[in-house]
Image (spheres, grey):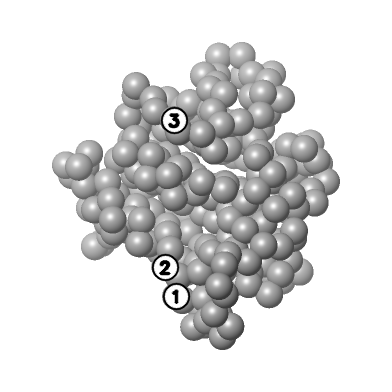
Amino acid sequence: MYADESLLYEENELFGGVFNDWRVKRVKKLEHIFSREWFKNKNVLEVACGFGNIGLYLRSLGADVTFADARQDSLDMVKKKDQDARVLLLDQEKPWILSQRFDLILHFGLLYNLDNWERDLRTTIQHTKYVALETAVARYSNPFECKIVEPEYPSELYGPYSGTGTLVSGSNIESIFEEMGADYHRYDDSDLNLEESWSEYRYDWKEEHGPVVQYSETPVVNTWDNIHLGGRRFWIAKNNSLVSSLNLFYK
């Protein structure tokens, strides 16, 4: 096992720069929770993999990784980096089912780029023992949903593949975990934060009850930079129907 941390750093400006720090901090959190050695021989699925930096790093730890993305251009980049990488074209706006079950699914930076986020999260949980979920969320402690339609991004490789994303509160997400009978722990930890200039990439912020105005229908905006955005959240959820050992939440 050789932990090649250079794989976490992307040279391409689309997924490089500040996102290198974003990846490193998320991976360090995973290694703290599971341990670096845990990944050896584990089956991992990285959805919305982008250029595959995290999955390629986990391969260096000995994990068996499947790289999934809705964009073929992203998967082509993964194969360019590693011709032996197993890739899967997967549009998670549509119903999906795979024959394989995984030890861990990485679901980073995807949920808020989905219109059908609830169906996708349920399907994800059904396919794995553990889910590592990271997403932007609304600032409210109570259930809330806001549709983001055709937001502007610097590249077609960013943002919702269908053109519509959804900003929800943490309570919306946790209600799906509970519905599915999954145990979960949310990490509102400052070691996940990016630099101060990227204030929307904070995890140690406090929610507020709201919205004050009760909407008769789901609000629609065209930008992530709106009054409903709270920041980011990070969860590890455990599918009890597939896990027989390794208690992560009561160390």
> In the image shown, does 217 or 187 lie closer to the viewer?
217
For this orientation, the residue located farthest to the left is 244
Residue 249 horizontal/vertical position (percent): 28, 60
122 lies left or right of 155: left
Dot 2, how many residues are within 10 Å of its Cα: few (below 14), some (14-19), or many (20+)?
some
Q: Position of residue 204 (x, y in %)?
A: 53, 73
Instruction: Give the mark nearest the N terminus, 2 or 1.
Output: 1
Q: Residue at x 57, y 67 (%)?
A: 217
Quadrant, the N terminus: top left
Q: Amino acid at mark 1?
A: Asn
Label 2–label 1 contact, CB within 8 A: yes
Q: CA distance from mark 2 to mark 1?
A: 6 Å
> Which mark identifies residue 171?
2
Q: Residue at x 69, y 44 (%)?
A: 163
Q: Residue 8 versus residue 201: which sits nearer the camera?
A: 201
Quadrant, the C terminus: bottom left
Q: Rate crowding at label 1 as few (under 14), some (14 to 19) or many (20 or more) other CA atoms within 10 Å.
A: some
Given residues 62 and 236, the one toward you in this image is: 236
State how far apart marks 3 and 2 are (Cα): 25 Å
Quarter assignment of residue 8 = top right
User: Badge 1 is on which residue?
Assistant: 142
For residue 205, above or below residue 8: below
Instruction: Name the amino acid type tagged 2.
Output: Ser
Residue bearing the label numbered 3 = 96
Q: Residues within 10 Å of mark 3 (few under 14, many from 20)?
A: few
**Which residue sits furthest top?**
83
Mark 3 or 2, nearer chain start: 3
Secondary structure at numbered mark 3:
loop
| Residue at (77, 37) in percent of width and height | 156
Residue at the spot 54% in from the left edge and 28% down from the top edge = 90
